[in-house]
Amino acid sequence: MRVVIIGGVAGGMSAATRLRRLDAEAEIIVLERSGHVSYANCGLPYFVGGVIEDESALLLQTPKSLHRRFALDVRVHTEVTAIDAAAKVVEVVDLSTTKVYELSYDVLVLSPGATPVIPPIPGIARAMPLRTVEDVQKMSEAVARIPSSAVVIGGGFIGVEIAENLHHRGVATSIVEAIAQVLAPLDPEMAQLVADEIQGHDVGLYLGESVVAIHPSTVELASGELLDAELVIVAIGVRPDVSLARAAGLQVGSRGGVVVDKFNRTSDLSIYAIGDAAEKTDALDGNATLVPLANIANRQGRVVADHIAGRTVRPLKTIGTAIVKVFDLTIATTGWNEKRLTAMGVGFQAIHTHPASHAGYYPGAKKMALKMLVDPFTGEILGAQGVGTEGVDKRIDVLATAIRAGLKAPELADLELAYAPPFGSAKDPINMLGYVAENVLSGLEETVQWNQVETLQREGFQLVDVRTAQEFAMGTIPGAINIPVDEIRGRLNEFNQDRVLVTCQVGMRGHTASALLKEKGIHVMNLDGGYETWVNSPSARNLQLVS
Ligand SMILES: Cc1cc2nc3c(=O)[nH]c(=O)nc-3n(C[C@H](O)[C@H](O)[C@H](O)COP(=O)(O)OP(=O)(O)OC[C@H]3O[C@@H](n4cnc5c(N)ncnc54)[C@H](O)[C@@H]3O)c2cc1C
């Protein structure tokens, strides 16, 4: 059996090495257009920034080492230019010699990845994308000349990573992002924390702005503003590379990726497609989706090798778990966000918490912001987001695992998670999300979200801030009165009897207050996530802009 694999990085090389472990005899040929295989493209931004100093650290294998260990025939500088699916033949160009030849296959695996989206704006030729080792080499050479300024077009995961790394190299850097926030997978009240972090490190941030032209030393924004930009990086996203697949007549889906079945077979059953080029199945709604991330590319490579080798495989669905570092912050997401749930008309209950990374009394505890989205009727966990300096990664990983395992949100309360003061809390942030979910879903507590406050105030709800007078004096939601939680019992006559909205710092004292007021027959709701969530929301930021 001859298996030909197009693309020798995440998906392609996982497929090749796994297949060799399962089948000692198969002829496995990997064709890679660039000069490198099996490189760590996720590490590329850190090489530009000098955090990873040695380029060879990113090059995990070479054709020689892969041949030695796995008897793979790996050909770099080798591009596949066409697939004849009927004849089961690919057309190949050896880019070093320009020699063209044909290669027959029994099974073909497509893992050509994605291509950066390059917007058609004047001057775009001088903007650099970051996708391959060759791209990073070019960018590193440009950065080594210490440009006085750089503009990164795009505030997504790669855009913010590269901006941080340019800043790390001492380059005055700005990010221009067309939508009103960075990191689209986050909801706006979470993304604001990241925007603050970026601006706090003197990286310029232009949100809701787009670049309309690139000039020799500046970029021009739609607003007419010119930004100094000796270096321009373009990172506005990627799209599946389906050029070969489309030309070969393989089905391309509505999301723009190669359509595959549950075994990653394309519309031609001798051809598989994996990684960024292939459409995935969303675990929540079963629809086609695109998730250009390394984990799923690697996993699909393995699944396809297993299927080729005749093993039983578990079909893969995706929830799109992702993480990124932005200066001192860790930002992680899994599943769907509120924007997407709303757009899809899916009902949800949002829960915001602001727990400490470990027991507050043990030195070094850091506060984080967590948001979980839950089906209000079934308790299914639909998605989660976390932003903080410590402990976010493990919480989102637990939530991603919970989603995969089908745990209901209240069951998070039952998880027995490792605890000692330096690492967590006896009531871990994950358990706390479960407690809140249990209270809210069972109707024990009624919560409202930051974006409902104004409307409820207009409807006549009395907004009561139950923090201390000192905290209240340092800032509160406009229109709130202050009755500290410890004084509630003695000041019950000050409460509006039928419509009260309580708020505190993060929602916990509000929970105690609402329980107390409810006992007294008052219709009360608690602001989810408290002042801390509200103050980072567009509601608060718009007010600040007005004042
Ligand atoms: C800068 C950067 C940072 C990233 N950071 C992260 C991260 O932190 N976390 C994460 O999960 N993901 C990250 N990713 C995404 C991740 O790298 C990809 O999802 C993953 O590599 C996709 O694997 P793949 O096999 O589909 O494609 P790739 O790994 O991109 O490999 C495709 C290969 O196919 C080759 N090829 C294409 N067409 C042909 C052809 N016709 N003939 C021969 N060869 C061809 C290409 O040269 C390329 O080397 C990052 C990506 C980049 C670029």
Image (cartoon, grey):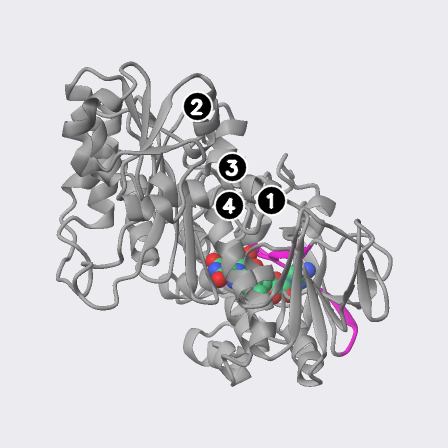
Foreground label between 4 and 3: 3
The answer to whether marks 1 and 3 mark residues whose Cβ atoms lie closer than 8 Å is no
Residue 361 vertical position relative to residue 494 in the rendered view, above or below: below
Residue 105 lies within the magenta run: yes
Give how far apart the Cα atoms at labels 4 and 3 are: 19 Å
Disc 1 secondary structure class: helix
Q: Which amino acid type is shown beneath numbered disc 2?
A: Gln
The local crowd at label 4, few if under 14, some if 14 to 19, many if 20 or more residues have their Cα within 10 Å, is many
Q: Quadrant of ligand 1?
A: bottom right
Q: Which residues are magenta?
A: 97-116
Q: Answer few, some or many: residues within 10 Å of disc 2's Cα (few below 14, many 20 plus, some between 14 and 19).
A: some
Q: Which residue is mark 3?
A: 539
Where is mark 2, residue-wise? 457
Q: Position of residue 480 (x, y in %)?
A: 38, 32
In the picture of the structure, the residue carrying the numbered disc 1 is 545
Badge 1 amino acid:
Leu
Badge 1 density bin: few <14, some 14–19, many ≥20, Cα 10 Å = few
Secondary element under disc 2, as helix, strand or loop, is helix
Name the residue carrying label 4: 185
- Say above or below: 174 vs 315: below
How far apart marks 1 and 3 lie (CA) works out to 10 Å
Q: Is residue 97 left or right of residue 542?
A: right
Residue 303 at what x, y percent from top left? 41, 51
For discs 3 and 2, the disc positioned in front in the rendered view: 2
State if disc 3 and disc 4 touch (CB < 8 Å). no
